[in-house]
Amino acid sequence: MIPFSKISITELEKKYIEESFINNRICGDGIFTKKCNKWFKDYCNIDNFLLTTSGTHSLELAALLAELKAGDEVLLPSYTFVSTADAILLRGAKPVFVDIDKRTFNIDANLLEEKITKKTKAIFIVHYAGIACDMDKILNIAKKYNLIVVEDAAHGVLAYYKDKPLGTLGDYGCYSFHETKNFVMGEGGAIVVKDNDKFQEAEIIREKGTNRSQFIRGQVDKYTWYEVGSSYLPSDILAALLYGQLSRSKEILQKRMLVWNNYNKRLEELEKEGKLIRPYIPDYAKHNAHMYYIVLPTEKIRDYLLQNLKNNGIEAVFHYIPLHTSPMGIKLGCKKGSLPVTEEYAYRLLRLPLFPDMSIDESNYICDKIFEILK
Ligand SMILES: Cc1ncc(COP(=O)(O)O)c(C=O)c1O
């Protein structure tokens, strides 16, 4: 069986985890959390970075910082993970789903303005597969209508829009380090906050509404309760695991890229024959080989290929079921047929196995099988 995803853990990660025990400081914001912060500062020039307990919690924190409330409307794609929409709903605001661009599966920036009303407060975008959204267009619209931009960059760690890391272009950027992502800590994430005052507020909310972070840094001699908060800081054991992954980021990215490029080269012929469509990378995007997907001519062919790959020991998988057609979407009053591109393309997409320690032989075997099955 070739699994869809497999973590790549070396002696380095194990050594750092052990060190976290020796440090005798396994709660949040310990030595390895600081090392992760410094890594993002040194390698990506990212300031105002906080590790969190998940990508989901980063989005919830962003929604709190954006002060979303009942009566506010928030634009987002329907083709995303539930957490993007949950963060909005948990604040009592209303998600307004926008169709996607069929080439990138990202929110279609050309459709944003027609969905904006007096109630619109924010846009939550998703950089699907680590391929950047059309940020200039999105940021111009946000500026024109005074909207907050939250980047769901769960897939987008170390991917870029022009020369800027994803997650650093909007007001808030949300990363995921879930075990299926490029760099893993089991469950975990991070938030990047553009505004310095909002960053201080983020530190407080993340620490149960207290200024404990300032206390730990020695800036105040006792800490106290400032506002409503929660606990969004991960254990330093998990930060140690992540720091090992970040230290190996070049190797991990290179290995993923080799597999991604091999798929892309091998499947070019099938695209020319009209049997499938390969991922589209706009000129402004530098992706991070987070995902390799193909788009089949119909749902029926997609399902046929999926089943036959499975029969050959290959775990290919589909992805999001459009949120607006889910039971929750229907409860929210969304209508089937309202987002035609999302509804068609979600059912034509198939993701192929991709993980750092996957061999070129394995990806060649998968391509051979795709050729055979689609014949
Ligand atoms: C687009 C998107 N946003 C958010 C999340 C949530 O991240 P996490 O699993 O770290 O909570 C995911 C998870 O896969 C995702 O794909």
Image (cartoon, helix red, strand yellow):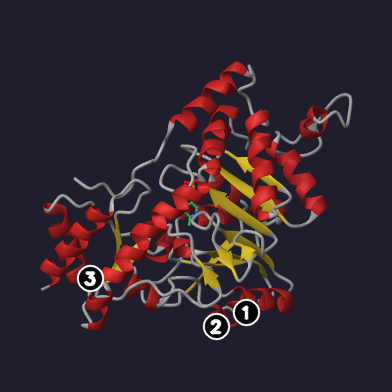
Left or right: 38 as drawn, with respect to 283: right
Work out whether residue 375 or residue 254 is closer to the camera in this orientation and state it.
254
Q: What element carries label 3?
A: helix
Work out whether residue 99 or residue 326 is closer to the camera in this orientation and state it.
99
* Tag 2: amino acid: Asn
What mark, if any, has residue 29 been given in the picture?
none
102 versus 16 height, above or below: below
Which residue bears the numbered disc 2?
110
Cα separation, mark 3 vs mark 1, equals 31 Å
Tag 2 near tag 1, CB within 8 Å: yes
Q: Earlier in the sequence, mark 3 or mark 1?
A: 1
Q: Earlier in the sequence, mark 2 or mark 1?
A: 2
Cα separation, mark 2 vs mark 1, equals 8 Å
**Which one is in front in this view, the residue at disc 3 or the one at disc 1?**
1
Which residue bears the numbered disc 1?
137
Q: Please name the residue shown 63% across and 32% down the image.
A: 32
* Tag 3: amino acid: Glu
Q: Please name the residue shown 45% across and 66% down the image.
A: 78
Q: Mark 3: few, some, or many residues within 10 Å (few <14, many ≥20)?
A: some
Left or right: 332 as drawn, with respect to 161: left
Q: Please name the residue shown 79% across and 45% down the image.
A: 200
Q: What element carries label 2?
A: helix
Asked whether residue 321 appears in the rendered view, the answer is no
Cα separation, mark 3 vs mark 2, equals 26 Å
Residue 308 x, y percent position in the rendering: 13, 59
What mark, if any, has residue 299 been given in the picture?
3
Q: How many marks?
A: 3
Work out whether residue 120 or residue 204 is closer to the camera in this orientation and state it.
204
